[in-house]
Image (tube, rainbow, N blue to C red):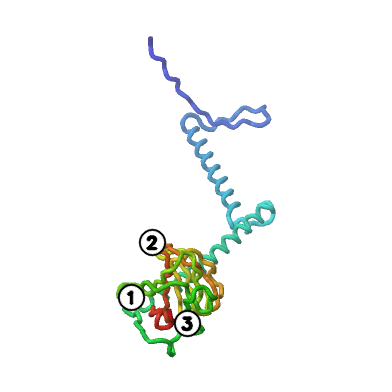
Amino acid sequence: MAPRRRKNRSYTLSLIPADGRSAPVTLLKGPAALFVFCAVLVVFLTMAGTVYSLFRSPLASMLPDGVLPARQKQLVARQAGKVDSLAAEMEKMNAFSDRIERMLFQGGAHAVARQRGRGGSGALPGAAAVEREGGRGFAGRLVTGAVSQRFMPSDSHYGIDIASRQGEPVGAVADGTVIFSGWTTGSGYTLIVDHGGFTTFYKHCSRLLRKGGEQVKLGEVIALSGDTGGESRGPHLHFELWKNGIPVDPEAYLSF
């Protein structure tokens, strides 16, 4: 049986009058007609997509009245407002990150203070001695427990560890403002309080009871002790005291 011949397809681009009385006008034939048709279709779809994107973007709020439906224009305006709000929040977060970074790294590792004196002119303002009398209020108490590791800057341990039961109340050692309340990979749930020249860190908590920006008072319960973060090896509170951006021995300023 002889193979069937493949029919050649031909394309014609014509204009057909709407009245139906005039003869169609042929513009192009063959592959050129198909190419022109596809090109026109691509241009049309591109323009349609551009117009749709414009109507969905914040620029739509700048279009003259009547071009965009009022309801759609209100929606676009609200979306633009949300974008502005997010941008403002990002600026605040960046400023906060810069502040924390300056506080943590000011002076470098070689600037670690090794002050061993008690109290004096450098005493933490508004702080009371830490009591360990077994649950009779929290006026000045940090947390119920015993010191398990002391301040050892030579071993990169810039605070003290207080072994305690899981969920023990943690009290603020002085009046101040919470500048960080959140999760970190190594320290778990962490709270940082600014006391004006002094900064206190409360790490490895199981729960944080105060948020960033809130004011705290001496002895106020601000967190619960725990065992969170990759650096924790059991329930305890890691407490750090920094003076003017430099970690100092908490036992030089507080009694444990």
- Percent position (x, y) of residue 151? 36, 76
Separation of residues labelled 1 and 3 (CA atoms): 22 Å
Secondary structure at numbered mark 2: loop
Residue at 43%, 83% in the rendered image: 253
Residue at 52%, 29% in the rendered image: 12
Residue 154 in sight:
yes
Residue 106 found in image quarter:
bottom left
Q: Name the side, left or right, on which 228 lies relative to 44.
A: left
Q: What is the three-letter code of the residue carrying label 2? A: Gly
Q: Which mark is residue 152?
A: 1
Q: Say which label, 1 or 3, has the lower sequence index.
A: 3
Q: Which mark is residue 38?
A: none
Give the labeled residue for mark 2.
230
- Percent position (x, y) of residue 61? 63, 58
Nearer to us in this view, 223 or 53: 223
Secondary structure at numbered mark 1: loop
